[in-house]
Image: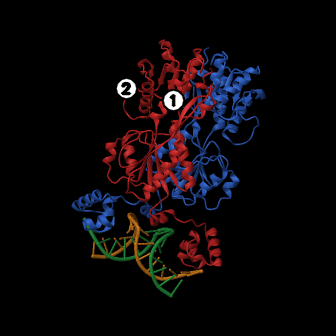
Chain colours: A red, B blue, C green, D orange
Amino acid sequence: MRDVADAVGVSVKTVSNVVNATGQVGDETARRVRAAIEELGYRPNPLARGLNARSTDMVTLALPGLGHGYCAQLAAEVFALAEADGVSVVMEPTGGDRERELEVLRNRGGLSDGVLLMPASVTARDLEGLAFPAPAVMLGPRRVRGPFDGVASRDADAAESAVRLLLDRGAERIVLLGGEREPGGDSPAALRSAGYRRALAAAGREAAPDLVAGTAASSREDGHAAIRGLLDDGVRFDAVLALEDPLAHGALHALRAAGFGVPRQVRVAAFSNDDDAAYSVPGLTTVTADIRSMARRALDLLASRVLNSAGPRFHVDVPFTIIERESTFSYA
Amino acid sequence: MRDVADAVGVSVKTVSNVVNATGQVGDETARRVRAAIEELGYRPNPLARGLNARSTDMVTLALPGLGHGYCAQLAAEVFALAEADGVSVVMEPTGGDRERELEVLRNRGGLSDGVLLMPASVTARDLEGLAFPAPAVMLGPRRVRGPFDGVASRDADAAESAVRLLLDRGAERIVLLGGEREPGGDSPAALRSAGYRRALAAAGREAAPDLVAGTAASSREDGHAAIRGLLDDGVRFDAVLALEDPLAHGALHALRAAGFGVPRQVRVAAFSNDDDAAYSVPGLTTVTADIRSMARRALDLLASRVLNSAGPRFHVDVPFTIIERESTFSYA
DNA sequence: CTGAAAGCGCTTACAG
DNA sequence: CTGAAAGCGCTTACAG
């Protein structure tokens, strides 16, 4: 900037004025300044700017990973919205590790104005114990109490609706694929499992233990193996609620191989609406949180929180939608 | 920092000394400074630090997207290695758009010290025309000439080796699944297609046009449909080289459904080694670039380039490996 | 072992 | 319409 000012023979303030369109600058002066900027390849130093503005227009996005559909979709939405807002996104994969989640919230040495965290392991107690945390918003299926704003998807409610849909379509015995055997906990799987039980209870039924099929992970292969196992064990069922889309794809596969018609004999619904869901045959009914509005709300909450770290905390729930496709159609 | 210094009754320099472990500080003084830091929740302002150091220890990672296995794997490696180096990563999805790729290289207003770009659309000519670009390293399958360092995977060579493997295993007619019908171009698909043709030529064979099966995208469904189409058309083949793993999974599926034994009747090989490759049945033989060393080299090159923007450009090729699994075994 | 000064590259608040 | 000064929060180079 000094260089530009000297080249044109004006003060740095004048250069600053033309760069930021602040103050008043004569047309001729502005033109010469612009020419010098062009020629010298001058770029305002964002660090120096930030030092004054006390802001970097950067946000840290901390997710357990990018492998799962939910996270990948959320990241994509955050990137797109942030870009439109003129803010950059620093990615910080936490691996779901508690220590790293806390580290992110401390934002030691971090340049970003605040952090968006999808908490996997961190507890309410951890959050309370955090001294001088960075401005942060928690987002995702887990709703953790604590001194932070939050945007949560209603996974339990979503699962409940999905089960209701399956019951409406005539299902009697619904497998919970990838589900938790024990009630309790606040992982996405636990929340969805709770919704499953709630819907059954509301319909005056009980969750049969032999219909809860846990899986090691959430891959196609896991889904395939689990359904395969049920069939081999002679377990009867006429519907599957898979807690992740890939599990459902594996299930479809296993059912087809075993000669079961979907949806005629077995209805299948799942979560996430990943790319394959629309293209599989049959098309897969999925329950999907409105990820975009989740990203939007989180970014907005964080922006407010950066401006005003005091004030009441906000917790917002994001709506979900059921996209019904062939896998649950009832041909009456 | 001012506050801490005042609280303890020392100068800012002394505080700076204990924070950075520079200079000499008395044990007692250091202890009191540390206590004050703790109590006041003081954190060094990274902006002010960066302003002096002329560095932010941040790097921009610009990829077309995170959807494909290659990109996702690369991103994961970059995150991990960067974290270990103490550098943060700003994600910048380009969507493969030329304008956005150029914008990233200009790094206007960007806080990062440099950029890692996986170029999709940008041409050598574009790069030459770039005035005052940020320090940058190009990485990925495309090797673009221009005033930048580069780390490239040898996709053509990798495809050539894969074809040689299939020939060794007794294949005569190898389908190029997801391949380009016309030679030329420098997209990954084009490069791999070129390797396919080269291997066949080296073996004294020709690439039969009916064996090149283009696909709209690289999903499982695309692979399934394409192989299905070939079978329906009565095209004879005894091997498939799929340019992306998901295509191969679709192919395996289609082959099984049609009653073909893999590898007994048809051998299948693919690229990328995605998570499913090891777990599919049969296990999928894939050719995989050493993504980690690609990330490592790119980060190192960028670090050097940030320190010294002049000097000769470096272009390094990253090795690839063939992981052979059941899908190409020959039961002699 | 500790401090006062200058400076990183910009902006803000005030003069003229 | 333009400039000189002070300051953002730190570090570097020099004194003592």
Task: Please state, as top left, top right, bottom left or bottom right, where the C terminus of chain A lies in the image.
Answer: top right
Horizontal arrangement in the rendering, residue A286 relative to residue B179 (left or right): left
Q: Earlier in the sequence, mark 2 or mark 1?
A: 1
* Residue at the disc numbered 2: A182
Q: Can see residue B5? A: yes
Residue B10 percent coordinates (x, y): 27, 68
Residue B2 lies in quadrant: bottom left
Crowding around mark 2 (Cα neighbors within 10 Å: few <14, some 14 to 19, many 20+) is few
Horizontal arrangement in the rendering, residue B67 relative to residue A60 (left or right): right
Numbered badge on residue A239: none
Mark 2 on the same chain as mark 1: yes
* Residue at the disc numbered 1: A162
- Element assignment for label 1: helix
Q: Amino acid at mark 1?
A: Ala
Residue A305 lies in quadrant: bottom left
Crowding around mark 1 (Cα neighbors within 10 Å: few <14, some 14 to 19, many 20+) is many
Foreground residue among B292 and A298: A298
Foreground residue among A318 and A217: A318
Q: Residue at x 49, y 65 (%)?
A: A49
Q: Residue at x 73, y 24 (%)?
A: B229
Q: Are marks 2 and 1 in contact (CB under 8 Å)?
A: no
Foreground residue among B286 and A287: A287
Q: Can see residue A111? A: no
Residue A181 percent coordinates (x, y): 39, 24
Q: Amino acid at mark 2?
A: Glu
Tell me the distance, in whole angstroms, between the alpha carbons under discs 2 and 1: 20 Å
Residue D3 percent coordinates (x, y): 52, 82
Task: Please state, as top left, top right, bottom left or bottom right, where the N terminus of chain A lies in the image.
Answer: bottom right
- Element assignment for label 2: loop
Q: Please tell me whether residue D1 is drawn above or below residue B86 in the rendered image.
A: below
Marks 2, 1: nearer the viewer: 1
Q: Mark 2 — on which chain does it sit?
A: A
